[in-house]
Image (tube, grey):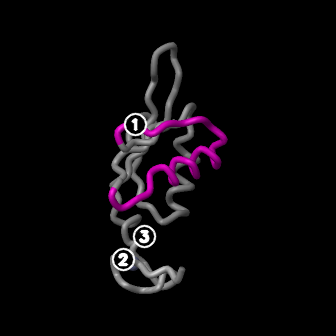
Amino acid sequence: MAGICSVCGLPEELCMCEEIAREQQQITIRSDKRRYGKIVTVVTGINTSDINVEELARTLKTKCAAGGTIKGGNIELQGDHIKKVQKVLIEMGFKVDLKGDVA
Ligand SMILES: [Zn+2]
């Protein structure tokens, strides 16, 4: 299958749609304290029609070596991984804001 992008009609290796979509995300990372003092890192603001959230969650879980879930289009990682998540997302071309207590 020759991959042709259904959005711009260019071959996939020339297509910039995913990169553009990543730049246009307004992603926020924060940490939440849950019951029993558990910390989770929450990634919000992902436009799930532009971005494959499952794939992104899988990447973040691998990079942070942490468990995680997708809840309502947000990615939740177990533990405090704000710095790591920020670094990984920026490397992938996402625009990222930080909210909440950043130590
Ligand atoms: Zn495209």
Badge 2: few (under 14), some or many (20 or more) residues near its Cα, within 10 Å? few
Label 3, residues with CA under 10 Å away: few <14, some 14-19, many ≥20: some
- Check disc 1 and report its element: helix, strand or loop: strand
User: CA separation, marks 1 and 2?
Assistant: 28 Å
Single out the mark in the foreground, 1 or 2. Answer: 2
Q: Position of residue 14 (x, y in %)?
A: 48, 85
| Label 2 within 8 A of ligand 1 by Cβ | yes
The magenta-colored residue range is 49-72
Whichever of callouts 1 and 3 sits on the residue coming sooner in the sequence is 3
Residue in the foreground of this view, choosing between 44 and 18: 18
Q: Determine the residue positioned at 58% across, 52% down.
A: 59
Say if 78 sits above or below 90 in the image: above
Three-letter amino acid code at disc 3? Answer: Glu
Q: Mark 3 and mark 2 in contact (Cβ < 8 Å)?
A: no
Q: Is residue 21 above or below residue 51?
A: below
- The numbered mark at residue 18 is 3
Q: Which residue is mark 2?
A: 6
Residue 77 in the image: x percent, y percent? 53, 37
Any atom of ligand 1 within 8 Å of the CB at mark 3?
A: yes
Secondary structure category for the residue under label 3: helix
Q: Nearer the viewer, residue 10 or 44?
A: 10
Mark 3 or mark 2, which is nearer the start of the sequence? 2
Callout 2 amino acid: Ser
Give the farthest residue toward the top: 36
Q: Which residue is mark 1?
A: 71
The three-letter amino acid code for the residue at tag 1 is Lys
